[in-house]
Image (cartoon, helix red, strand yellow):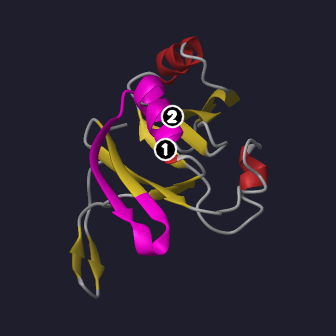
């Protein structure tokens, strides 16, 4: 199989060629930043503080993928944080964030070496032609590694 290529989709606001970012609500922004830096090698690329809204934001990037960590004072933890993929899907809304990797097995082993908790070991999905594993961030949010199989 060939690698998946970027496609475009017609959209009322123009042509969408790729996603911009995803945002993850966290209880402790600074602790989450440290976790993403130490475990995934992310770097903070921007910060914002909306004092009137009690919101702090950090944009973090790994390779060319940027996502947003958002701390809202008084936010509630996801009731399924730390659960399994089926549990996360029981509440509508974002379920996980996925990272494309060269080797699911090697990335899983490296992250385990760094103390990351995995909830789903590397598994092949032949119909999708991918190998995936799932792990949790500091807040219990689910993240996924995806290796495209040829």
Q: Quadrant of residue 41?
A: top left
* Of callouts 2 and 1, the N-terminal one: 1
**Tag 2's secondary structure?**
strand
Q: In the rendering, at what x and y percent does residue 135 appear?
A: 62, 33
In the displayed image of the protein, which residue is found farthest to the front?
Answer: 51
Image mark for residue 115: none
For disc 2, the marked residue is: 145
The answer to whether the residues at label 2 and label 1 have Cβ atoms under 8 Å apart is yes
Decide whether residue 50 is among the magenta residues.
Answer: yes
Horizontal side, residue 82 vs residue 116: left or right = right
**Quarter of the view holding residue 137:** top right
- Compared to 30, does 35 lie above or below? above
Crowd class of label 1 (few under 14; some 14 to 19; many from 20; radius 10 Å): some
Dividing the picture into quadrants, the one containing residue 116 is top right
Badge 2 local density, few (<14 within 10 Å), some, or many (20+)?
A: many
Instruction: Give the mark count.
Output: 2
What segment carries the magenta color? 30-56
Instruction: Provide the residue designation for mark 1.
Output: 98
Q: Residue at x 54, y 16 (%)?
A: 114
Spot the residue most to the bottom.
12
* The magenta stretch spans residue 49: yes
The residue drawn where x is 41% and y is 68% is 51
Q: Give the Cα separation between the discs numbered 2 and 1.
A: 6 Å
Residue shown at the point (62%, 67%) measured from the top left: 93
The structure residue drawn at horizontal position 72% and vertical position 48%, both measured from the top left corner, is: 81
Tell me: residue 118, above or below residue 106.
below
The answer to whether residue 6 is left or right of residue 99 is left
Judging depth in this view, the residue of 26 and 118 nearest the camera is 26
Q: Pick the quarter of the image with the C terminus.
A: top left
Q: Residue 118 in the image: x percent, y percent? A: 67, 27
């Amino acid at each position: 199989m060939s690698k998946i290529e970027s496609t475009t989709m017609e959209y009322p606001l123009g042509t969408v060629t790729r996603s911009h970012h995803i945002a993850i609500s966290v209880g402790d922004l600074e602790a989450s930043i440290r976790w993403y830096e130490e475990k995934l090698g992310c770097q903070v690329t921007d910060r914002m503080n909306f004092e009137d809204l009690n919101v702090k934001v950090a944009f973090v990037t790994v390779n060319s993928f940027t996502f947003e960590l958002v701390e809202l004072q008084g936010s509630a933890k996801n009731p399924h944080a730390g659960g399994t993929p089926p549990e996360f899907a029981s509440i509508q809304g974002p379920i996980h964030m996925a990272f494309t990797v060269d080797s699911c097995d090697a990335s899983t082993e490296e992250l385990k070496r760094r103390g990351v908790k995995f909830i789903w070991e590397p598994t092949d999905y032949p119909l999708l032609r991918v190998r995936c594993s799932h792990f949790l961030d500091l807040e219990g949010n689910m993240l996924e590694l995806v290796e495209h199989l040829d």
